[in-house]
Amino acid sequence: MAVKQLSETLINQIAAGEVIERPASVVKELVENALDAGATRIEIATVAGGKSLVRVSDNGGGMNGDDLRLAIQRHCTSKITATLDDIATLGFRGEALPSIGSVAKLRIQSRTPDADSGFEIQITGGKVGPLRPSAMNAGTVVEVRDIFFATPARLKFLKSDRAEAGAITEVVKRIAIAFPAVRFVLSGTDRTTTEYNATGNDRLARIGQVLGGDFKDNTIAIDAVREGVGLTGYVGLPTFNRANSLRQFAYVNGRPVQDKLILSTLRAAYGDTIPRGRYPVAVLAIAIDPALVDINVHPAKADVRFRDPGLLRGLIIGAIREALTNDGDRGSTIGTRNLAEAFRPGAGAAAGHRTGAHGAFPTHRPTGSRMHDHSPQASPFRPVDGGRPNGFAEARQQTLAGTASPAGRTDDPASEPNGEDGFPLGAARAQLHENYIVAQTADGLVIVDQHAAHERLVYEALKQSLQAREAQAQALLIPEIVDLPEEDCDRLMPHAEQLRALGLGLERFGPGAVAIRETPAILGEIDGAGLVRQLVDEISEWGEAGGLAERIDYVAATMACHGSVRSGRRLTAEEMNGLLRKMETTPGSGQCNHGRPTYIELKLADIERLFGRS
């Protein structure tokens, strides 16, 4: 079969398959072009989810006639010259406009500020029309109609108008957060008009426009630098989480990205403070030398590759965990709002569960019920390895010091602290339904779930005990041999020392196998081969093996749950106040091991509003 040159139209249609996946891709490319042109006002209009029309208008620098002719040719751009090592613009490949024109009806009007009039050019399914004069204001207007009319097979894979319109909205939100000095207007027959007014350098104000007013009150600012790489932004409180990752925004040198390394690192940074299936809220901005990151991984430019991913991972995890340790134990305003609503007249007639930012939690629980219990009986935990010390007993004793044998609740105020001003969680005033501690603070009250709170304290103490020395390992009488492809063995063995510290002893056993000689004692009897293969998969995907540490943390969390103060147990005033003081000094005590809140705070002003006093 003879080799022949493809036509320019077919080449552009092939390129469009990667650059233009859906109408949202068109919006992304056109808005990025407008930003690169210096626009301060950008308007986006859509019809039928962008399938029938996408129009992007801006007040940027515009183009003259010669530039307009070149702009619709492949690999023609004003943004780079000879190197990819110092890209400071959002676009640089010169593929978007010709790709769009090859699969849709494209019309571009543009005028420079110093020109008397503008110019217009049209492309229909790859066929370029003549350059014509156009009466318009300075800037550029790009209209894209009937996307994929020239490639009907692609059109069939688009989703409903509502879904496509939603995807466009998400694209605009991500870009708007990165450019707070630019005014964005999103309108059309398929949506309610959304406007983000320029906020100058106030990025938090722009984030509030995009993500809502709750964001500011439920996030923590981060600002960290490591080896020349900067990280700034805002991360949500652990209890301010969502059911999906749509509220996670990452930017590299101002470019919105959806990089797997960043998103997985963000989840790892929160660790066990968020329930499985829930996602933290975060806006992260990374400043890095352009030579140390490859943004040319894919034509869509959403994926990037870092020269030193370990440096970036350590920076993100360290900055977020430090922020959570210093300021992450306060309750979210969502819980406060739900509590206030529960006290309003008529709230008791609502359904038995109220859903908030933390998922569903009961508004009423019978006396003596056990939150988070994993077994019908509150039996004491027995070590999985037949009695070998594992740090659990000392961890539990640490958190129960001075409170081991309660005789019942004490209601004598003389036995309580003389004032609550010096304590963030206040002084205990009562215990309700043998599970909820009510404490008075200087400016309100706090309601604490005693089981959830003590569970966290035991868990943190147990983790400290485990980290203070290498995890104990149990030797296998007969080593277990796991057959693996040679390349998987090569990936796994550089992590052998890290795994050994967690109690998993591995040795190379020929070119295509590893021998398991020890397993973590805390895990008891495990499927060693399955664990090793899971670790190999993690290393192949993320470059690290985190699954073993997660398993150990999970067992530690289960031990803490079974060893903590049970719901239904009456506490003395000293015990309740002792629990509050421990919470104030323990990182992560704002949520239990399952990610649910351990306490909810209600300010005095909120209480007064409930009674119409303010």
Image (spheres, rainbow, N blue to C red):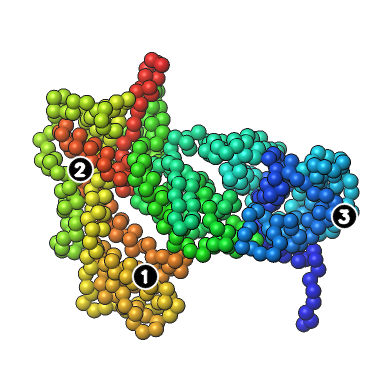
Question: How far apart are the alpha carbons under marks 1 and 2?
Answer: 38 Å
Question: How far apart are the alpha carbons under marks 2 and 3?
Answer: 77 Å
Q: Position of residue 117 (x, y in %)?
A: 87, 42
> Can residue 209 be seen by looking at this rendering?
yes
Q: Nearer the viewer, residue 323 or 435?
A: 323
In the image, taking residue 93 as reference, residue 354 lies left or right, namely left
Three-letter amino acid code at the position of disc 2: Val
| Residue ID at (29%, 65%) | 502
Q: Position of residue 555 (x, y in %)?
A: 27, 57
Residue 129's tag is 3
Q: Secondary structure at mark 2?
A: loop
Q: Position of residue 56 (x, y in %)?
A: 73, 44
Query: Which residue is tagged 1?
Result: 495
**Is residue 269 positioned above or below 202 on the image?**
below
Q: Secondary structure at mark 3?
A: loop
Place residue 70 in its image quadrant: bottom right
**Is residue 377 positioned above or below 308 on the image?**
above
Query: Which residue is tagged 2?
Result: 565
Indicate which label's residue lies in the foreground, 1 or 3. 1
In the image, taking residue 309 as reference, residue 379 lies left or right, namely left
Q: Counting residues from the N terminus, which is met first, the one under dot 1 or under dot 2?
A: 1
Three-letter amino acid code at the position of disc 3: Gly
Question: How far apart are the alpha carbons under marks 1 and 3?
Answer: 60 Å
Q: Nearer the viewer, residue 525 or 391?
A: 391
| Residue ID at (28%, 72%) | 505
Q: Nearer the viewer, residue 472 or 351?
A: 472
Q: Nearer the viewer, residue 420 or 127?
A: 420
**Is residue 518 positioned above or below 224 on the image?**
below
- The answer to the question of whether label 1 and label 3 lie on touching residues, with beta carbons closer than 8 A, is no
